[in-house]
Amino acid sequence: MAIALALNAKAYYGTAGSTATTEVENIRDITLNLNKDEADVTTRGANGWKLTVGTLKNGSIDSSIVWDDEDAFFTAIKNAYFNDTPIAMLFLDKENGQGLDADFSVTNFTRNENLPEALTADITLKPTYSTRYPAWTEGS
């Protein structure tokens, strides 16, 4: 059994419309949220049970980054948020691993100013309308 350690996970960014290839170093804890909408398919023959099928997939990323205006990734995220432009992102469980590849819209860019800490930004990314659809990729 191979256990995946979070410290070996990889995040990449790049230009929307292509797979991200530049590794992100200025990123902290990452949460990859995956779920599906549901459709009720209950029938009278279901013996009193409610039946459900999954429909549209939803994905989002929640993370935080250090507020560093000289960092290229920070600048890319900030610009994507303020200019309403997509950014390519790839989130893998390890180098050449598996994960979500998509063009994302930055829907949250919240600055945190905790007195004893460095400034950080909480970010939320969601797949967006683009020339390529979100995909679960599996590397080597």
Image: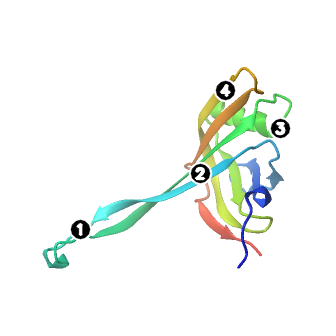
Q: Nearer the viewer, mark 2 or mark 1?
A: 1
Q: Amino acid at mark 3?
A: Ala
Residue that badge 4 annotates = 112
Question: Where, by quadrant of the figure, is residue 64 drawn?
Answer: top right
Q: Amino acid at mark 1?
A: Lys
Residue that badge 1 annotates = 50
- Residue 130 is labelled as 2
Question: On the rendered image, what quadrant is the C terminus found in?
Answer: bottom right
Q: CA distance from mark 2 to mark 4?
A: 30 Å
Who's the residue at 71% across and 61% down the image?
Answer: 92
Question: Where is residue 80 drawn, in percent x and y?
Answer: 67, 36
Q: Nearer the viewer, mark 2 or mark 4?
A: 4
Q: Amino acid at mark 4?
A: Asn
For this rendering, which residue is in front, 19 or 42? 42
Q: Is residue 81 left or right of residue 56?
A: right
Q: Is residue 13 left or right of residue 110?
A: right
Mark 1 touching mark 3, by CB under 8 A? Answer: no
Sequence-first disc among 1 and 3: 1
For this rendering, which residue is in front, 104 or 15? 104
Q: CA distance from mark 2 to mark 3?
A: 22 Å
Sequence-first disc among 2 and 1: 1
Sequence-first disc among 4 and 1: 1
